[in-house]
Image (cartoon, rainbow, N blue to C red):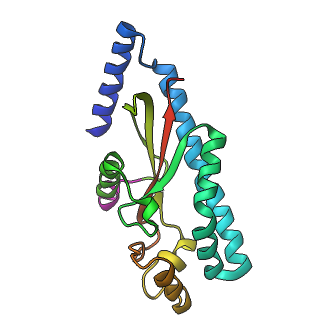
Amino acid sequence: MKRTSLFLSSVLIVGLAACSGSHPGVEEQAAASRKAQQTADRLTGALLGELTAAMKEGGPIRAIQYCSENAQNLTNAIGKEMGVSVRRVTIKPRNPLDVPDEWERGILERFDTAARQGLLKADIHEDEIMKMDGRLVMRSMKPILIKQPCLMCHGTGRDIPGDVEQLLKTRYPEDQATGYVVGDFRGAVSVIVPLDN
């Protein structure tokens, strides 16, 4: 149902573009969507690679240190490289910087509902064109699902070693990001692609 409404709103935007010349056409929308997906894939791939290297270097303790010290910088660098704004968001944040805005929360809740019904796949995404701060943008969200290596820092009590649990409590006293199993919905990569320059 949601996919239909998103499609219909895109058709409406294209129709308005023909009248006003101020909205992007179908090709520009498709290009923006591709850029958003490429950014999300690049970010998740880069973070997974860096965290895997940190785990090999010093186990989950080193991975937590890497994440808390470098993940935001890596995210910002990829956004700059791709010419977009990008971040990771979740309903159950570890880092307060990952708290969603109202639009992101709505998408996260839809993804969470789909996950609970067994319908969420890692390759889906939701796009929407809107005005932000007076600029036309495409906002896009792509889900992040829990993989096996994530469990040492995000799993249940039996998955997380004692020293890791202690470091998490010290670095993230308000942490909500544990209790997951493989395949669970963790959050999403949120991308904003500018459409008017």
Name the residue located 53 percent from the left edge and 67 percent from the top edge.
Answer: 147
Residue stretch rendered in magenta on the structure? 114-120
Depth check, front residue: 136 or 190: 136
Name the residue located 36 percent from the left edge and 49 percent from the top edge.
Answer: 104
Depth check, front residue: 172 or 64: 172
Specify the farthest residue to the front: 133
Quadrant where the C terminus sits is top right
Name the residue located 62 percent from the left edge and 75 percent from the top edge.
Answer: 65
Is residue 141 shown above or below 173?
above
Specify the farthest residue to the bottom: 162
Magenta stretch encompasses residue 117: yes
The spot of residue 144 in percent (x, y) is: 47, 57
Is residue 162 shown above or below 120?
below
Quadrant of residue 54 within the rendered picture: bottom right
The spot of residue 188 in percent (x, y) is: 45, 54
Is residue 132 shown above or below 98?
above
Depth check, front residue: 120 or 41: 41
Specify the farthest residue to the right: 57
Is 32 on the left or on the right of 55, as rendered?
left
The spot of residue 55 in percent (x, y) is: 67, 76
Magenta stretch encompasses residue 42: no
Is 10 on the left or on the right of 34, as rendered?
left
The spot of residue 174 in percent (x, y) is: 39, 76
